Amino acid sequence: MYIYVDVVFCVNIIMNTVILLATAWLARISYVWWRVLLASAWGAAYVIGGVVPQLALFYTPVFKVVLSFSIIWAAFGLKTWKALLLQIVIFYIASFILGGAIMGWLFFLYSGDPFTNINKLPLASWTSLACGSILCLLFIVVLTKFVLNRMLRQRTLYQAEVRYKDKCVAFTAMLDTGNALYTILGRRPVVLINQTTVEKIMDDSVVSFMQDCPADRWIESLDVCEDDVWLSRVQIIPYRAVGNNSLLLGFRPDGLVIKTKSGRVETDNVVLGVYQGVLSNNDMYQALLHPAILKV
């Protein structure tokens, strides 16, 4: 049996590069190409060393784990140990997916009983490696974009209802861990909610005011609104948008109820920030919850 070192080296560089790029994409980390290629070459050189019997000591599971750490460090650097461990785990997951995708592709091409004729399986070729790499990337995209994201959304979506006067409206809210909006007066957490949703509990005069007046002029035109009770609950919320500071119109409802797996969370120490646009393009949720709400 002949081993072509140059072919093995090139194949491993390609496979290592695919795995490292998948790791970077899954871990949401930036990278530079020369470091990824350098780490891939280092991993490929390690594989080539396996043909030397005297180096067998360096091919135990312990040294393979050490090699994995060195490859990740060479490709992405060391920011924190926690981040490095996460990258190592993702690196192994991507490796197993790529290996399984290539083997799956070979089994897909093979005709016959693979258990009695295992030695007759087709050898890995450049085509098999390319197809396996494409399948690997497709599996990773499907896994993260559709499966994991759907599971995450299900864990962060809550059924809620808000009360004001004698009216109540139910809606779906998403927990926004990046929401750090508080009112200046009373330091109440702010829940951002669609205008069309909150209008269902407003009096007609307030609805007419919001619909007739442009959203960017709501605050300066509050004197036009005829609902004094609602105006007494209005609060102006400063917030920082991209590149500038702005103001958000909000008001205090009578109460907010969030339904969780452990029970109901009720609070009146909250302000609804009215958002004229649409928070979710597919209308999956109509409000963004402040994380402090669930700690009440």
Image (spheres, rainbow, N blue to C red):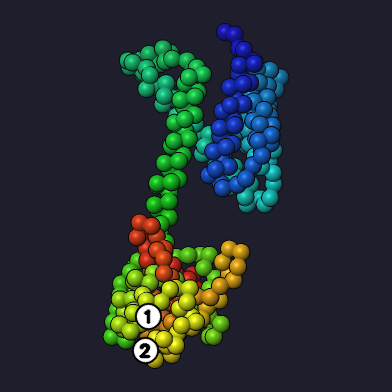
- Sequence order check: which comes first, mark 1 or mark 2? 1
Please state the horizontal and vertical placement of residue 165, each as a whole percent of the image.
Answer: 32, 86
Q: CA distance from mark 1 to mark 2?
A: 10 Å
Which numbered circle lies on residue 209?
Answer: 1
- Is 149 drawn above or below residue 49 in the view shown? below
In the figure, is residue 163 to the left or right of 214?
Answer: left
Please, what is the three-letter code of the amino acid marked with disc 1? Phe
Q: Quadrant of residue 261?
A: bottom left
The residue drawn where x is 44% and y is 31% is 135
**Quick one: SS at disc 1?**
helix
Residue 93 seen from this side? yes
The reply to whether the C-beta atoms of the residues labelled 1 and 2 are less than 8 Å apart is: yes
The residue drawn where x is 58% and y is 26% is 14
For the residues carrying marks 1 and 2, which lies nearer the camera in this image? 1
In the figure, is residue 242 to the left or right of 156?
Answer: right
Q: Residue furthest top?
A: 1
Q: Between residue 86 and residue 40, name the one nearer to us.
A: 40
Quadrant containing the N terminus is top right
Residue 294 seen from this side? no
Which numbered circle lies on residue 153?
Answer: none
Please, what is the three-letter code of the amino acid marked with disc 2? Asp
The residue drawn where x is 60% and y is 47% is 29
Q: Between residue 20 and residue 249, name the one nearer to us.
A: 249
Q: Between residue 84 and residue 243, name the one nearer to us.
A: 243
Q: Which residue is mark 2?
A: 227
Q: Mark 1 Cα within 10 Å, few/some/many (few <14, many 20+)?
A: some
**Quick one: SS at disc 2?**
loop
Q: Quadrant of residue 229?
A: bottom left
